[in-house]
Amino acid sequence: MSLYEGAQNKLSNRNHNRGILHADFDAFYAAVEQRDFPELRNKPVVVGGSPSRRGVVASASYESRKFGIKSAMAMSTAVRKCPEAVVVSPRFVVYREVSRQVMEVFRDITPLVEPLSLDEAYLDVTHLIADDITPPQIARNLKQKVRSKLGLTISVGVGSSKSVAKIASSINKPDGLTIVRPGGEIPFLYPLPVEVLWGIGPKTSAKLHLLSINTVEDLASQPLEILSGIFGSNATHIKEISNGIDITPVITQRERKSISSETTLLVDTSDVEDLNEIVMRLSGDVAESLLKKNMRGRTVKLKLKRSDFTVVTRQKTIPEKVQISSEIAESALELLNLELENSHEKYRLIGVGVSGFATSENLQDEMQLRFAGL
Ligand code: DCP
Ligand code: MG
Ligand code: MG
């Protein structure tokens, strides 16, 4: 059995029916500047610190890359390479807002979004796949939505794992769409230079070239002992991703662990009916946020601040994930009544929150249980 067949067998032994997208803005900061200031379009725009103050390049428009300008280069070098470059100072507030907007566009497609930085994210679309819905179609739709809603282009990679999708999105920039079909991982990866793999920077790649390891195939065919000498405990992982094997899940909501709403009362109260009504209203607010983000959670939390400023929190984890107002209110009211049963306190602040969101793994488990008729 050839190495190729061996790796392919290994691949098919794992769950490789996933549909993972990696999306990344093209020349993010520079593209936002060109969008907002039309006079910069089609010009070699470089966003970063001033050349006279030892600034570095944060983002280089594709027009400027023809001159050899790259991110992290000294701005003085960039200007030397291209004297007509237009150097623009960054507007971080704007980039953060554009980032928030693009993540919303992603979350309109699936709640399984894992942001990696301001300008890129993984999306797990496995659960959306149907006879007439394929990951490449979802990717095309995503690119089109980002273009029409934000006026910017992204490059998207489609694959059966995060590492394949990330490599795929990076090799056809700008405005790229690279599709690696299930089973096509090895023919896709093997001819590529080792630098495409996550975590192989200039220092490591120099070491690899000294050992005549230039392509992903070269890397994949190394004995583990050689790789351990270079990558330490990461060697197995490197070997696996060189063979297109990567089962790490898309992890959502890294930045957000719960969605909640709270209110401080104008007058402290112990009135059961008032408190019930407020809890129902807050449950409605939380449900609205969850629906907008297309998220469901499993844990409902109630927060109460008493007149003496002590805070009580009570939470309940339920078997079915909740999203709508009545489901959230049911648990929150139960928690409220538990608290009120043994208390004669007045309360000054009330909050309701939902956490325990879906990750691609537990969503996948759930889908499988559903298919199994459980
Ligand atoms: N960034 C930075 N300094 C770096 C690298 C990046 O400040 N050394 C910022 C500016 C980039 C943004 O992060 O616009 C996104 O980084 P990317 O690596 O995705 O680079 P770009 O989006 O600019 O270009 P590409 O089209 O290669 O993705
Ligand atoms: Mg980018
Ligand atoms: Mg990026």
Image (cartoon, rainbow, N blue to C red):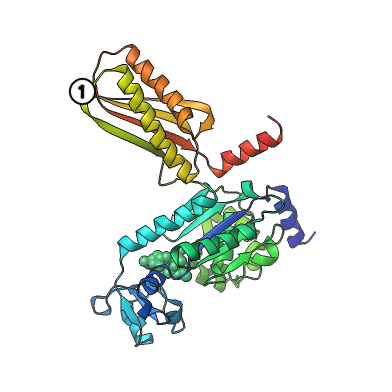
Residue shown at the point (40%, 31%) measured from the top left: 283
The residue nearer to you, when weighing 293 against 11, is 293
Residue 4 in the image: x percent, y percent?
74, 62
Left or right: 135 as drawn, with respect to 264: right
Quarter location, residue 60 = bottom left
Count of picture labels? 1
Whether residue 113 is situated above or below residue 34 in the rendered picture: above
Q: Residues within 10 Å of mark 1 (few under 14, many from 20)?
A: some
Residue 35 in the image: x percent, y percent?
40, 72
Whether residue 278 is situated above or below residue 223 in the rendered picture: above
Disc 1 under 8 Å from ligand 1? The reply is no
The residue under label 1 is 307
| Residue at the limit of the structure toward the right, as seen here | 1
Residue shown at the point (63%, 53%) measured from the top left: 19
Left or right: 172 as drawn, with respect to 369: left
Quarter location, residue 351 = top left
Residue 371 in the image: x percent, y percent?
70, 36
The residue nearer to you, when weighing 339 against 196, is 339
In this orientation, does residue 164 appear? no
Residue shown at the point (32%, 78%) measured from the top left: 87
Whether residue 292 is situated above or below residue 133 in the rendered picture: above
Left or right: 223 as drawn, with respect to 232: right
Amino acid at the residue labelled 1: Ser
Residue 95 in the image: x percent, y percent?
36, 62
Left or right: 290 as drawn, with respect to 97: right
Residue shown at the point (20%, 23%) measured from the top left: 307
Q: Quadrant of the C terminus?
A: top right
In this orientation, does residue 219 appear? yes
> Mark 1: which secondary structure?
loop
